[in-house]
Amino acid sequence: MESSAALADLPQLERRTLTDTAYAALSDLLASGRLAPGDRLSLRRSAAALGVSVMPVREAVSRLVAEGVLEVAPSRIIRVPIMGAGAFRALAETRIAVEGIAAARAAERRSGAERDAIRQAEAAFRAEAEASQPDRIKAVQLNRDLHFAIYGACGLAPLLEIIGRLWLKAGPVINLDLRACPERLHQGFALRRHAEALAAIEARDGPAASAAIAADIREAADFILSRGTLRDESGER
């Protein structure tokens, strides 16, 4: 039997893989806080950095635009959206609910290896945050790594996917705040809440782990909102 018709229906695996790779790389830039609201993204420069053609990067960007993580300005410039205060509050409350569930399940279900990974991630963030001159971008990334070490132990892939999408929107705002207010690292709010979360996970105390993560998210959000750098609901700063 002639197979050409069937073969024509097969997906273009190489192209799809390149697009997925570009999508994952750009997503990591957003979630780890290496891009901030208002930052522009060049298709050509992104493609050159990844060592691919522009097409898979364009497709990856289209996916991120459809998800509301990137936007196309009237001048066709691709950039990270500038989030308003109301949207940021809603994002924080959603994260508190969803990430609290993941932290609780992680505390109750984590393996010894997952506990050790969480310990290492907490220690890495602590070392950077307590440094005399911490690398703020690295600190944001290490903070993300710790949170996802915790959430990765929850045992629910769909929940982890939801959290990942929330962080695509949260990461840039957190980064922007640390750029403007680096002293927040030295205030120790995150360090205390991370230590509480680690202790709860070690003790398999789900409610305490959820409470620690909720407090971590809420305190960071309250601090960012208190600075008044996010635009109000009318779109004015």
Image (spheres, rainbow, N blue to C red):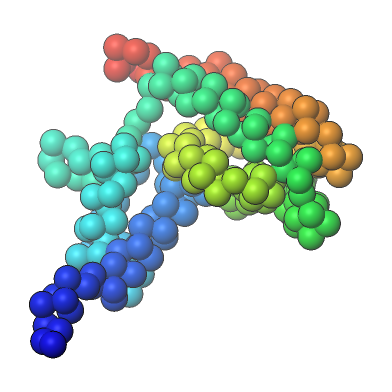
* Image location of residue 56, percent across then percent down: 25, 65
Q: Nearer the viewer, residue 134 or 62?
A: 62
- Check the image and name the residue furthest to the bottom: 1
- Check the image and name the residue furthest to the front: 1
Task: Say whether residue 47 is visible.
Answer: no
**Can you say whether 228 is above or below 41 in the image?**
above
Residue drawn at x 71%, y 39% as measured from the top left: 105
**Can you say whether 57 is above or below 193 in the image?**
below
Q: Is residue 151 left or right of residue 167?
A: right
Quarter placement of the N terminus: bottom left
Quarter placement of the C terminus: top left
* Image location of residue 128, percent across then percent down: 72, 50
**Can you say whether 132 is above or below 20 in the image?**
above
Task: Say whether residue 237 is visible.
Answer: yes
The mark total stands at 0
Res 95 → quadrant = top right
**Can you say whether 88 is above or below 26 in the image?**
above
Q: Is residue 8 left or right of residue 69?
A: left
Q: Is residue 21 left or right of residue 213?
A: left
Residue drawn at x 17%, y 71% as measured from the top left: 9
Q: Nearer the viewer, residue 133 or 205?
A: 205
Res 181 → quadrant = top right
Residue drawn at x 61%, y 34% as measured from the top left: 99
* Image location of residue 73, percent across then percent down: 19, 38
Residue drawn at x 59%, y 19% as measured from the top left: 222
